[in-house]
Image (cartoon, rainbow, N blue to C red):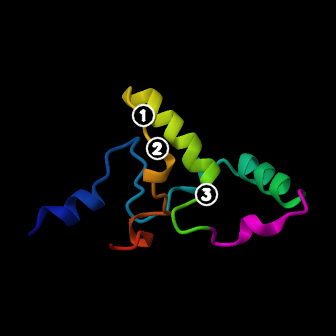
Amino acid sequence: MHPLPIVQTQIPPGVIDLGMGNPPLSVLPLDIIREAAQSALSQGDNSFLQYGIEQGDGYFRAALANFLTDGYGFPVSPENLFVTTGISNAPAS
């Protein structure tokens, strides 16, 4: 038998399996998500509900570039970052 099915069904205690994208509901910060949604929806601008630009949100890419620049110790440009919701949503190019 191939070892992959064994690895996927025998998850060590304390490990949160994100392989299927179904974390236990107990680990989701629902209060924080609810507060963020309420704040975003009360702004009167619902454009954030659109898919957005292909490369990802510019503000997020700028913040991520700053974070990566600090972490790696060399400049990371937001123009070189491409943000997706997961590997299956990244277009091949």
The mark closer to the camera, 3 or 1, is 1
Task: Kindly indicate the quadrant of the structure image that contains residue 42.
Answer: bottom right
**Eye-nearest disc, 3 or 2:** 2
3 and 1 marks in contact (CB < 8 Å): no
> Is 17 located above or below residue 92 in the figure?
above
Residue located beneath label 2 in the image = 77
Residue 79 picture location, percent across and down? 48, 52
Query: Which badge, 3 or 2, comes first in the chain's sequence?
Result: 3
Q: Secondary structure at mark 2?
A: loop
Q: Find numbered disc 3 in the image and state the secondary structure of the residue it sits on.
A: loop
Reading the image, the residue beneath label 3 is: 57
| Nearer to us in this view, 65 or 42 | 65
Residue 51: image x %, image y %? 63, 72
Residue 34 picture location, percent across and down: 78, 54
Apparent side of residue 5 relative to residue 12 in the rendered image (left or right): left
C-alpha distance separating marks 2 and 1: 6 Å
Circle 1: element type:
loop
Residue at the spot x=73%, y=46% of the render? 32
* Residue 86 found in image quarter: bottom left
Membership of 6 in magenta stretch: no
Disc 3 and disc 2: Cα gap in Å? 14 Å
Residue 26 position, x and y percent, is 60, 50
Q: Do the residues under discs 2 and 1 have CB atoms within 8 angstroms?
A: yes
Q: Which residues are magenta?
A: 43-52
Q: Image quadrant of residue 18?
A: bottom left
Q: Circle 1 is placed at which residue position?
A: 75
**Of residues 9 and 73, the one drawn nearer to the viewer in this rendering:** 73
Badge number at residue 53 = none
Q: Are marks 3 and 2 in contact (CB under 8 Å)?
A: no
